[in-house]
Amino acid sequence: MTEQSRELRSQQWYAGQGRDAYIHRAWMRRGVPADAFEGHKPHIAIANTASDLAPCNSHLNEVASSVRDGVLEAGGVPLNMPVVSLGETQLRPTAMLWRNMAAMSIEEMIRGNPIDGVVLLGGCDKTIPALLMGAASVGLPAVVVPGGPMLTGTFQGVALGCGTDVWRLSEEVRAGTLPAEQFTRSESAMIRSRGHCNTMGTASTMGLLAEALGMVLPGLAGTPAPDSRLLEGSHATGRLIVEMVGAERGPAQVLTRASFHNAIVTLAAIGGSTNAVVHLLAIAGRLGIDVTLDDFDRIGSHVPLLVDLQPAGRFLMDDLYRAGGLHAVLAQVRDLLDPTALTVDGTRLVDHLDDVPIWDPEVIRVREAPVLTEAGIAVLRGNLAPGGAIIKPAAATPELLQHRGKAVVFDSIEDFHARIDDPDLEVDGSSVLVLRGCGPKGYPGMPEVANMPIPKRLVELGVRDMVRICDGRMSGTAYGTVVLHVSPEAAAGGPLALVRTGDTIVLDVAGRRLDLDVPDEELAARVPNEATVAGFAAPTRGWERLYVDHVLQADSGADLDILVGASGHEVSRESH
């Protein structure tokens, strides 16, 4: 490593002969040589979200070891720093409730500790967004190592897409076309290896978008978790962060308006998760970058879908990797990217896209033969969503993208579960299922419940999709004609709280409209019914209370209002 041209931040703790410096050094020695504290070696935190209760991240201790080796090789001092980990499949009431808490705690651990740079290890859905939000608010040099997708499991000779096939197979059980015991047997085959979901769900999407944003060593995102090349790239990332500290290359130099433009283009081209919208908005908010909901439509809606992966297509993440990976996709839409955007290694993103081959044109399509010609997120507005709502056309039934139907309203998720299979429920295939009370404030936390199961008697008749509307989210592994993130949510006074069963709802994706066909004067006279209000969250203490009091709406990224913006890395007072 070259000589530092400036004093390292960690020297604010370790330099000098006073009592406080003595304490900081002495408690950290424990076998570490004295020259680690002399100001020549940057101290690098490895923000590690490994946890047995976040099963998609359980292998990150091994990844951290490779990062550690790279840091040591480059002349740095590596420091394992376990941080809050969020297991999407395990946490109740929803991992999204804790994303902002994780980001806040990560921010404070980065700021409050004697470190000069940080490597961010994440995989499962909310971990990479939380890590990026926290690191962006502090501004120290930071780089992401995505934990990578699992390998494809098979059941009875058929590849299983985790998440997507859970939804599909569970509906077949409800339809009576798949025995329940066969569904249960597939469970042990669904998760074949360490790593996150192997579909283009939120975890895969955010790993790839972290690289599109420039925050990953180019070429690393999407590497399967069990692949030895992930450890090779982790080692290289350890070396890179030491170089980044020397160059003073932090998030402010990498995360720019141009990089968010490229992330939105990438989101469309890969058929990524709708959850990326709230995460990208939240990350941009930490940096003061003006990214809005409408940018996703303006920049991304006309981008072709080039990746044929579940849930919008056929293949899985290890297929994408063998077919050429993210760079092969981006090379096809290079003309749509902002060429000025930088990556963590100081080069431009587009500099890595020269002569990148596609090894399997079935998995990654060429620009002239896309899966869909226009596949980006569509932003809807109207009297039912004045703050906006989104839909993923690539995962929807084309015939339902323009639809007029009668509302069947559920006041809470409990109400939905209690009545959806009631044989007396007045519903048919043209109905519009409406679920409210599932937004950031109302649940709380904006859960992945918007892809509501189809009523059982309709499933038995062969119905596999209906228009569904919700102020919550859906899993990135899910599919269907689902309108999400309706803003303002019902619990924040949004018109979704006023919809009544039998009202006519008009969906026009091409026209970007979502409307309730009720006269304005009638709508103005309505008030939410008692069941709707009773379903809203009303926490009295702790994080849930803080969250409900301060969370923003989905169209602003659902961050806390007190966390928007950056605070920098300065800590004004000593600890002793």
Image (cartoon, helix red, strand yellow):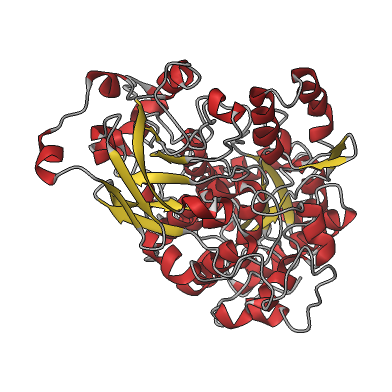
Residue placed at 46% from the left, 44% from the top?
Answer: 574
Foreground of the two, 417 or 101: 417
Side of 542 where 24 appears, left or right: right
Instruction: Locate residue 508, reporting x and y percent.
Output: 37, 56
Instruction: Name the residue: 53% across, 53% down.
Output: 276
The reply to whether residue 340 is visible in this rendering is yes
Which quadrant of the figure has residue 434? top left
Q: Residue furthest front?
A: 461
Q: Is residue 168 above or below residue 64?
A: above
Q: Residue at x 49, y 40 (%)?
A: 466
Q: Nearer the viewer, residue 13 or 426?
A: 426
Examine the rendering and report whether any part of residue 347 can be seen.
no
Q: Residue at x 55, y 65 (%)?
A: 263
Total marks shown come to: 0
Percent position of residue 394, x then y: 57, 57
Q: Quadrant of the N terminus?
A: bottom right
Question: As drawn, is 285 to the left or to the right of 162?
Answer: left
**Front in this rendered view, residue 204 or 383:** 383
- Please provide percent x and percent y for residue 491: 29, 33
Question: As displayed, is residue 183 above or below residue 297?
Answer: above
Residue 490's image quarter?
top left
Q: Which percent across, then down, holds residue 83?
A: 61, 39
> In the rendered view, would you say 334 is above or below 310?
below
